[in-house]
Image (cartoon, grey):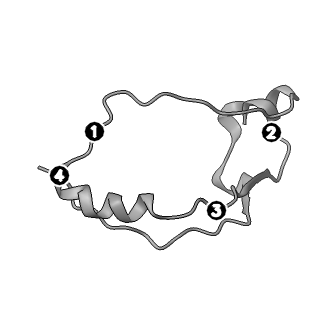
Amino acid sequence: MIAHITGLKPGEFVHTIGDAHIYSNHREALLEQVKRVPRPFPKLEIVREVKNIDDFKFEDFKLIDYKPYPKITMKMAL
């Protein structure tokens, strides 16, 4: 979105997760998740010209070639 607004070419998005943890009741579901072979990333297309970051709407985005695996349900740990 920032590249679109500034007219720059999109690059990589890198972030760090703080306080990441795994709950014991999520173990089996996470073992299933790590067995999955990564699929190619989908493409995100911005379908209209937007000049201000606050003017984006849900309808401005088109997700192309998104092929998700079935969801893995994990209960909230209390």
- The answer to whether 15 is drawn above or below residue 36 in the figure is above
The answer to which of marks 1 and 3 sits earlier in the sequence is 1
Q: What is the three-letter code of the residue carrying label 3?
A: Arg
Q: What is the three-letter code of the residue carrying label 4?
A: Ser
Report the Cα–Cα distance between label 4 and label 1.
Answer: 10 Å
Q: Nearer the viewer, mark 1 or mark 2?
A: 1
Residue 35 location (% of width, % of height): 45, 63
Circle 2 sits on which residue? 50
Circle 1 sits on which residue? 21
Q: What is the three-letter code of the residue carrying label 2?
A: Val
**Residue at the (42%, 31%) spot, across then down:** 17
Looking at the image, do the residues carrying marks 4 and 1 touch, with CB atoms under 8 Å apart? Answer: no
Q: What is the three-letter code of the residue carrying label 1?
A: His
* Mark sitting on residue 72: none
Q: Nearer the viewer, mark 4 or mark 2?
A: 4
The answer to which of marks 3 and 2 sits earlier in the sequence is 3
**Residue at the (66%, 48%) spot, across then down:** 57
